[in-house]
Amino acid sequence: MRLIEITFPEDYGDEVRDALKECDADFSRMGASQRDGMCSAQVFYTSGSAQDLVDRFQDMFENEDDWRLLVYPIEATAPKPDADEAAGPEEKNNERALREEIYDDVADGAGFSSNFLVLTLASTIVAAIGLNSDNVPAVIGAMVIAPLLGPILAFSLGTTLGDVKLISKAGRNAIIGMGIGMAGAAIIGLFMDLNLESDELTSRIVVGLDSVALALAAGAAAALSVVAGVSAALVGVMVAAALLPPAAAAGLFMGAGEFTFAARSLLLLAVNIICVMLAAQGVYFWKQVRPRTWLEKRSAAKAIRINLIVLGALLAAAIAIIVFAPTEVIPDNILGDAVDEVTGGAQRASEGEGAGQDAGQGEGQREDN
């Protein structure tokens, strides 16, 4: 449910009345003219989309400066609305947040700020330590607090709307966030011995076709939660479409000089990013998230076409690597190397102890002689 309030010059009174009569709203009211020559109107929706009415108002007042449209979320109303019976299946299927609501939510998540920087650094530290110590709760916590999903969703939305500014900002901040995550983990990897017996760490070098399916599903759920205005569901998506743990794992492996394992972690990260963006693009298309003006629609069509071609080619290349390279299993030597390192150290210690005992026995024999 939402309430739309529009304040406008009284000269547009007849046009606004016509728009209110034609809108498919549950309740609408036109206010009287004020002393300052301004009027106001209110429109209440219990279901369905008010996007057509909002677009009509924006077209109507496009050349005016003295007007304002406000959208309020409504928690409850009386008398109780009978929205379930009034709305048909097609209307329920197309029910979504307004384009402006989606844009504000996604753009906020794509912004670069001190909070973004601190959260990325903090989640990197938590993820790196959690991965290396096989601490599952720590890894999950890092997934939830990492703010990396926002720029990815914003990039797809910017492509859908043909918003070059949003595309540029989201792409830049996504690269910065991933770079901070990998660089921070690489520094930690320089001073921390890798625990190759950690399931959390070694699972980030396993990339299969199931990884593609998981990322596509998670990306679709993320975009759908944003479009439907259920942002709380993003917490679960952040865990499913984890972006920071593979980035942190790649950084840890780079810091330790394990570049083959780092490449496999980067492959998993690339698959997650590509699939989330593709799935989000599909959901925005399905839910008819469109630009308003003809020029924006033309720009969006070109951006979507380029984006789909690039993402499709990258996904095909990633799938080819998965199919033809042994990335779906943990390398046979990874645990063997860890065991050899442990057993080798124990063997060296026992040899040193045996040498000490032999030297002691030899000294005892010389004293007896």
Image (tube, grey):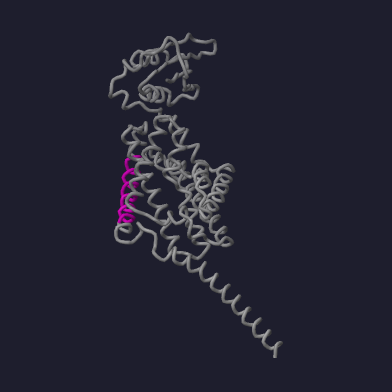
Q: Which residue is found at the position 57% from the left and 46% from the top?
A: 117
Q: Which residue is found at the position 42% from the left and 41% from the top?
A: 153
Q: Pick the residue in front: 366 or 135.
A: 366
Q: Pick the residue in front: 87 or 58.
A: 87
Residue 260 position in % (x across, y down): 43, 64
- Residue 311 drawn in magenta: yes
Classify residue 164 by image quadrant.
top left
For the N terminus, the quadrant is: top left
Is 155 on the left or on the right of 146, as rendered? left
The residue sitting at the bottom extreme is 369
In the displayed structure, would residue 59 be above or below residue 153? above
Q: Which residue is found at the position 44% from the left and 61% from the top?
A: 261
Q: Which residue is found at the position 69% from the left and 88% from the top?
A: 366
Q: Pick the residue in front: 123 or 206.
A: 206
Q: Pick the residue in front: 145 or 197.
A: 197
The stretch of residues the image draws in magenta is 300-319
Residue 75 position in % (x across, y down): 47, 19
In the displayed structure, would residue 279 be above or below residue 60? below
Classify residue 86 by image quadrant.
top left
Residue 299 seen in render: no
For the C terminus, the quadrant is: bottom right
Residue 139 position in % (x across, y down): 50, 47
Is 182 on the left or on the right of 225, as rendered? right
The residue sitting at the front extreme is 368
Residue 226 position in % (x across, y down): 42, 33
| Magenta: main secondary structure | helix
- Residue 320 drawn in magenta: no
Residue 189 seen in render: yes
